[in-house]
Image (cartoon, grey):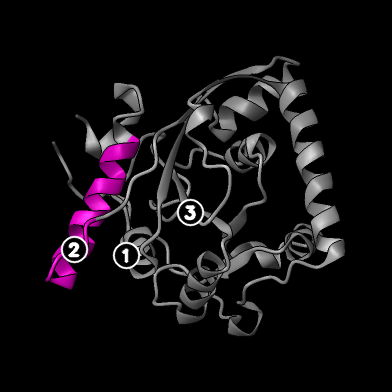
């Protein structure tokens, strides 16, 4: 199995907003907004996508667990929210906060902001706290939307969090959700065919050597994602 690095360097956040990085409080207003956004996401998904879902039975009835997924485009989060039976804490890049209106909406929803390409200790503490409180946290271990449309080399963030929190991991994979496909079909008034595969939960092995456990854990996460994907989506983890 190939595990070569992506030819495209991973992004690093150019802005710094540590003061907004925290675990969102689950206020009554935020719970209502999340239910509303989940409803809107289901409507959007029904209107613009033909989604085939496999493995719903693998979703645990409650947290805590860590959701890991490949990341092809904007539709991934929308579809993920629409199909989740329980609220999910989303880890989002800090750059999104600077987008007018959209950044404010994400703040209202309550995401865990993260500065990419650097050790963001506040984000790490927030995720670990969320898992300790029994919440569900979702992130993309590739660290960004894939520039190739297939799996890129995974970063160690997901494995680090899973090992530190001793958390269950739920792997979810998408096909057919790249932005150019989705938006191109919307312009043509066509529904996009998208598949969502939900695998069984698993845990990472904590060995005596932390660095080895982290590297092996990252490979385990990415291999689990790869085996749920068709060959053309496996990228550097081609089986």
Query: Residue 161 appears at what percent x and percent y?
Result: 39, 65
User: What kind of element bears circle 2?
Assistant: helix
Q: From where the camera sits, is residue 94 visible? A: no
Q: Residue at left 58%, top 34%?
A: 179
Which secondary structure type mostly characterizes the magenta part of the structure? Answer: helix
Which quadrant is the C terminus positioned in?
top left
**Does the magenta-highlighted stretch encompass residue 171?**
no
Residue at the far front in the pictured view: 61
Q: Which stretch did the figure color magenta?
A: 205-225
Q: From where the camera sits, is residue 159 visible? A: yes
User: What kind of element bears circle 3?
Assistant: strand
Residue of label 1: 163
Please say if 222 is above or below 188.
Answer: below
Pointers 2 and 1 in contact (C-beta within 8 Å) = yes
Name the disc covering residue 65, or none. 3
Mark-to-mark CA distance, 3 and 1: 12 Å
Indicate left or right for 153 with 135 as reference.
left
| Precedes in sequence: disc 3 or disc 1 | 3
Please say if 118 is above or below 45.
Answer: below
């Amino acid at each position: 199995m190939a595990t070569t690095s992506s030819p495209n360097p991973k992004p690093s956040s150019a802005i710094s907003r540590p003061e907004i990085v925290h675990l969102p409080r689950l206020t009554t207003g935020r719970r209502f907004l999340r239910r509303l956004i989940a409803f809107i996401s289901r409507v959007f998904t029904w209107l613009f996508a033909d989604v085939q879902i496999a493995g719903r039975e693998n979703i645990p009835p409650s947290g805590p667990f860590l959701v890991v997924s490949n990341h092809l485009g904007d539709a991934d989060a929308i579809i993920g929210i629409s199909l989740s039976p329980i609220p999910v804490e989303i880890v989002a890049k800090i750059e999104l906060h600077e987008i007018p209106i959209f950044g404010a909406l994400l703040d209202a929803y309550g995401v865990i902001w993260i500065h990419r390409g650097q050790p963001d200790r506040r984000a790490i503490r927030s995720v670990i706290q969320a898992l300790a409180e029994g919440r569900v946290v979702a992130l993309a271990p590739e660290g960004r939307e894939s520039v190739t449309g297939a799996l890129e080399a995974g970063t160690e963030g997901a494995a680090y969090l899973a090992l530190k929190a001793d958390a269950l991991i739920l792997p979810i994979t998408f096909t057919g959700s790249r932005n150019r496909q989705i938006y191109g079909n919307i312009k043509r008034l066509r529904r996009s065919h998208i598949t969502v595969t939900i695998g069984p939960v698993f845990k990472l092995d904590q060995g005596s050597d932390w660095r080895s456990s982290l590297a092996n854990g990252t490979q385990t996460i990415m291999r689990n994602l790869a085996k749920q994907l068709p060959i053309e989506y496996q990228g550097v983890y081609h089986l």
